[in-house]
Image (cartoon, rainbow, N blue to C red):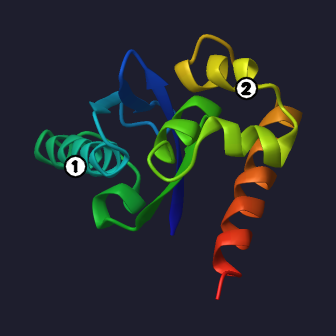
Amino acid sequence: MEKIKVLINWCENNYSTSISDKGIGVIVATAKTLDGIKKEIAEALQQRIEWAVEDNENIEDWAKNGDYTLEFELDTSALLRSIEHKTTLKAIHKATGINENQLSHYFTGRKKARPEQRAKIIKGIHAIANELISIT
């Protein structure tokens, strides 16, 4: 089974992504929602493979057989956008200690979070989720 890593970004009020390292050309997708971008890139990849097969292009067996899975990862901006209706930047600030203004820059995509900051954000989101789960 071929695993295709798909990094989802947030850019100008849309989720966006591309696949370019699998020997089947460049595939690009955008959508307004996280579910939408996952669906769009999956359909675009499937369509590109179908065209390659029809045109007798030399493509990998995994592609011809549909023997692949997409593994999605969100950049920090897309991650924050994906949970914007479930929590607040203030709550994430309290859970992470990262300044709200800095979080706002990550949220809008004006700045990219360093890996350490991203890890803190994810840990903070998990802490918020665990706190909510523990409510009885």
Callout 1 amino acid: Glu
Q: Position of residue 20 (x, y in %)?
A: 46, 30
Identify the disc placed on residue 55.
none
Residue at position x 24%, y 51% in the image: 46
Query: Residue 112 at what x, y percent from top left?
Result: 69, 19
Q: Secondary structure at mark 2?
A: helix
Q: Residues within 10 Å of mark 2 (few under 14, many from 20)?
A: some
Point out residue 55 in the picture as x, y percentages from the top left corner.
13, 39
Tell me if 111 is positioned left or right of 4 in this view: right
Residue in the picture at 36% in, 36% down:
24
As drawn, the residue found furthest toward the left would be 54
Q: How many neighbours does mark 1 have within 10 angstroms: few (below 14), some (14-19), or many (20 or more)?
A: few
Residue 43: assigned label = 1
Q: Are marks 2 and 1 in contact (CB under 8 Å)?
A: no
Q: CA distance from mark 2 to mark 1?
A: 37 Å
Give left or right: position of 34 versus 100.
left
Secondary structure beneath dot 1 equals: helix
As shown in the figure, which amino acid type bears the numbered disc 2?
Glu
